[in-house]
Image: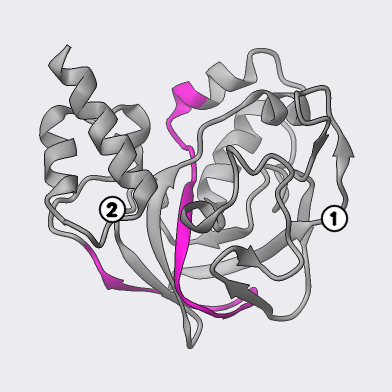
Amino acid sequence: MPLVTAVCRVEQLLRDSGTIGITAIDKRPVDGPVRVRPLGLHADVQADRKHHGGEDQAVYVYADEDATYFAEQLDRPIPPGLFGENLRTTGVDVTGLVIGERLRIGETLELEVTIPRIPCGTFARRMKVDKWVKRFAEEGRPGAYLRVRRSGPVAAGDAVTVLERPEHGVTIGQMFAGLTAEQATAVLAVGDRLAPKVVREAQLALRRAAV
């Protein structure tokens, strides 16, 4: 059964050599249910709100299976929260989630798949792995951002249920790799239900294809 295995939120703000000067990537598991609202988990925060957070990136989810893969590749543990994720799951093909797919977690929380995580310099400094951004990108296991369609609590052990999966079938992994014109057109055909960041990514893919 697909489950949430850990719920993580910021432990402390850390100094960072990037342009913001601090980072909230230090997420760690918390006990008990945590309320999730349109801007994310209660008591969580993002330091660089231009590139992280907001309604379309309210929750970042990463799969235990992908974390295990990286743990084997790097020969080190990848505990929940190390990648800055809010939710760690098991039994969920996060890379294979369809753009716009709606999930129920627990009894009431409903989330919608939006865009993949793009690795950045802050992430690289966190990991201290040579050429980490390139390596992470090449593996094609980015994790997914979600927006909140219905607020509710989340806790480790909650079941993850698919409520709706768009027929276009375009996945987080495909968007991360770069949408083709056909894929972008299929995504945009969903209409006004799309998250704004999804619309922008699909439109950008079409412009690139037209060059």
Q: Residues within 10 Å of mark 2 (few under 14, many from 20)?
A: many
Classify mark 2: helix, strand or loop: loop
Q: Residue beneath label 1, please?
A: 11
- Which is more toward the observer, 73 or 156? 156
Quadrant position of residue 7:
bottom right
Segment tinted magenta in the rendering: 137-165
- Which is more toward the observer, 167 or 38? 38
Q: Is residue 172 magenta?
A: no
Mark closest to the chain's N terminus, 2 or 1: 1
For the residue marked with disc 1, what is the amino acid? Glu
Q: Residue at x 48, y 38 (%)?
A: 142
The Cα–Cα distance between marks 2 and 1, rounded to whole angstroms, is 31 Å
Quadrant position of residue 82:
top right
Outermost residue, bottom side: 107
Q: Is residue 145 magenta?
A: yes
Q: Residue beneath label 2, please?
A: 98
Image height of 15 relative to 24, above or below: above
Image height of 13 relative to 72, above or below: below
Classify mark 1: helix, strand or loop: loop
